[in-house]
Amino acid sequence: MLLLTRCRTEFKTLALVADVEKDVSSYCVQKLREDAEYMFRVIAENPVGSSEALESDTVTIRSKYDRPSPPRGPLDVSGMTDTSFTITWQPPETDGGSPILEYIVERREVNKKAWQKVGSTTVDVTHIEVSSLKVNISYHLRVTARNDVGPSVPYAPEEPITAGKRISAPSSPTNLTVVDVTSKSVTIQWGPPTSTGGTELTGYIVEKRQSSSNKWTKVVTLEPSVTQHCIANLKEKSEWFFRVSAENSIGLSPPASTELVSLKTHATVPSPPTAPLEIRSIGPNSIIIEWGIPESDGGAPLEGYTIAIRDIRKTMWMEVGRVKVGVQKLTIKDLQENHEYLIRIYARNEVGASEALESEEPFKVLRPTDMEQQEVEKMDTTAPTLSFSTETTTSWMREAGMDADIHSYARGCLLRRDEYFFRIWYYARQLFK
């Protein structure tokens, strides 16, 4: 039998912890007081008597968690007015092993001893506005970090601050809101800061951060008159935070930040351009086509239109070219007189191309009569012009040349819902023996 006892050194009294079997060589002692000092003894017993005690060194009971270290400086001042300013600090070097719950900010008039609470912020906010200050009165400030264990030692700069006595960085932009979200872009809008810090603004800085990262990336620097910006080319289905800082000759304001923004995932391709698809000959080798805008953009802004054409004597559709979103009229040149053609128009957004608006029947390219030519001359022919030559384009087109050890190939920019034929030629510098 083994006897385990404990002694709290400040009281110097022994207390039995447990009787344990002879083959037990370790034991967990619970319900000890934190920050107290203890000694432990183990005594072996048999029917004859007790052994001498095996005694431990003094042990101080500590929690595995600690209070955080103090918040760090420098204490930056921005948004200075006659009765208020904003202070910004840096997070502590360590959180003591337990997440920081909040920062507590206090102020004290220089000639007084009592501290007054200004407010508290969450762990991700390291700035606060100090308002309702007395004119021409200097204040000391201190910031404390708190976790589950308790508050840190305060960070308290020695130099007092007097509202309105110096030029500072501006205060944060106001009313930052998200005004539009698409599948690949976010538009944000904000108002000017309540204080410019006593000097003119020089601009705004817009930043972004993906939800899976802690790194902020600069998007753009804007003129002080610009209070709206579209952040484009974002990854579909991603989630982002955005923030905007005001800037003057002294420096940057604390940022104004958005909540988490999730890009839309329901955007689709647009609906087809609307009929009628009007086609007219304007020469022996030229036509002009015109179409209507789609009924729906699919939830993402239209980017333009793709035009394809096929000579009915051939099987392959050929892309003539692309036009911008504001263009709904196009001249196609270098066609073959007396040949018949089919036309397709596709609308495009960032997701892809729509179904085609297709001519109902082949259009035959004929030389206009004298009367038709007079009407053509009266028409508005300022539409963009693209060329399509059937003399130099056959149904088979060379696509690429590759080394002999390559066994696969990918082809992009094919037209939706069309059939293609592919063939492969093998070229050798000499015949096989």
Image: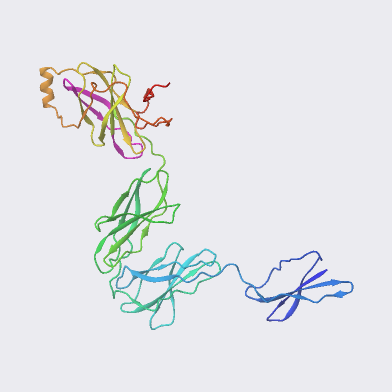
Q: For this view, does 100 lie left or right of residue 33?
A: left
Examine the image and state in which quarter residue 130 appears: bottom left
| Magenta stretch holds residue 359 | no
Q: Residue 124 at what x, y percent from top left?
A: 44, 61
Q: For this view, does 143 lie left or right of residue 315?
A: right
Q: For this view, does 169 lie left or right of residue 127?
A: left
Q: Main secondary structure of the magenta part?
A: strand
Q: Residue 365 at what x, y percent from top left?
A: 20, 18
Q: Residue 224 at what x, y percent from top left?
A: 25, 58
Q: Residue furthest front?
A: 433
Considering the image in quadrants, where does the N terminus appear?
bottom right
Examine the image and state in which quarter residue 295 appears: top left
Q: Residue 306 at what x, y percent from top left?
A: 29, 31
Q: Residue at the spot x=78%, y=64% of the render? A: 24
Towards the viewer: 335 or 62: 335
- Number of on-image labels: 0
